[in-house]
Amino acid sequence: MIAILTKNAPDEAVEHLSDWIRGKGLDVHISRGANEIIVGLVGDTTKIDPILLESMDIVERVQRVSEPFKKANRKFHPDDSIIDCGHGVLLGGGFFQVIAGPCSVEGDNLIRIARRVKAAGATMLRGGAYKPRTSPYASQGMGEAGLDLLLEAGSELDMPVVTEVMDPRDVALFLDKGVDVMQIGARNAQNFPLLREVGKTSTPVLLKRGMAGTIDELLMAAEYIMSEGNPNVMVCERGIRTFETRTRNTFDLNAIPAIHHLSHLPIVADPSHATGHTRYVGPMARAAVAAGADGLEIEVHDDPAHAWSDGAQALTPDMFDQLMKDLLRIRSIVAPAKTEA
């Protein structure tokens, strides 16, 4: 349930209303938009008489929210959320960013790749220190040493780093190390203890869609994080498993406008994991920008043939240079650059 308040509702009256709602055992979420104030009621709303609520002087109207996700719902928060990813990098609400780097942190080549992607225009550095692999015998990543390399590169280049956390027990380590954005991978999209643990922090979270997850399931996973108090969530379309076998996954471009319609959260697209083939990454990256994605996550490696993981979908730095030029041209047409909040 949401209560839309009068535009000029006094702060004292809004706080009094919030206290009254909390007294009924519900949580309150207040969103102040350009033209209205929205109070979201989260919990057992059968305890609230909507007619009584609507009769209050500062309440313009009351509306029930049918979707199970509440805090992630655009009805609760009409304006696009803007996420501060660190190092002055904002994502969402017109701020577009490209996250680039190798699938796995492998060693000294990381800084070379990082320098190239930044020079091409990437604003955030990705790399996996802990890798969820289908086979227990495949490379599982460098672990804590990989985190240190990633953070050293991010510090040198003044770039936020994005890296995957797989275990609730590792969240404290990521916080201690100063990871800028914690990524939840597709295999952990419904790892509810992990979602709750990152939700107890204020660190931005990049939440990937599950391997066969629906849009509603993705937004409900975001709701798990937000319900613990962390509003800094970005969702990621990375393709879903279907009957098609010619690509690694089926890239669901529909999800980009659909999520913008349903939710205020920024949406990032990952054409690398979606397609699984270098030749398709560029076309799908361009399509995602045209569809309105708030950001892209792209794998780049200086020697894909010898990459520890996912070399078949990695762009070389030269390929990435050209792609960034294409993306900037498309972006200038569909959504002119925004530089100030």
Image (spheres, grey):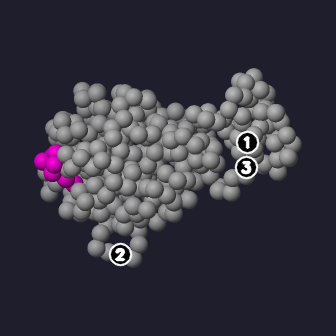
Is residue 318 highlighted in magenta? yes
Residue 306 figure quarter: bottom left
Residue 151 figure quarter: top left
The residue shown at (69%, 53%) is: 65
Is residue 115 highlighted in magenta? no
Residue count near mark 3 (Cα–Cα under 10 Å), binned few <14, some 14–19, many ≥20: few
Which residue has dot 1 on it? 3
Visible in this render: residue 104? no
Give the magenta part as a residue range: 314-322
The residue shown at (69%, 28%) is: 8
- Give, as a three-letter code, the residue at label 1: Ala
In 3D space, how far apart are the residues under numbered discs 3 and 2 (Cα atoms)?
A: 41 Å
Q: Which mark is residue 327?
A: none
In the current view of this chain or complex, which residue is farthest to the bottom? 243
The residue shown at (78%, 48%) is: 45
- Give, as a three-letter code, the residue at label 2: Glu
Q: Predominant secondary structure in magenta?
A: helix
The picture places residue 337, in percent across and down from the top left corner, at 33, 38
Which residue has dot 3 on it? 63
Q: Earlier in the sequence, mark 1 or mark 3?
A: 1
The picture places residue 138, in percent across and down from the top left corner, at 29, 58
**Mark whose residue sits in front, 2 or 1:** 1
The picture places residue 61, in percent across and down from the top left corner, at 75, 44
Q: Is residue 121 left or right of residue 56?
A: left
Q: Is residue 312 left or right of residue 265?
A: left
The residue shown at (87%, 42%) is: 52
**Mark whose residue sits in front, 3 or 2:** 3
Residue 21 figure quarter: top right
Name the secondary structure under disc 1. Answer: strand
Which residue has dot 2 on it? 244
Tag count: 3
In which quadrant is the C terminus drawn? top left
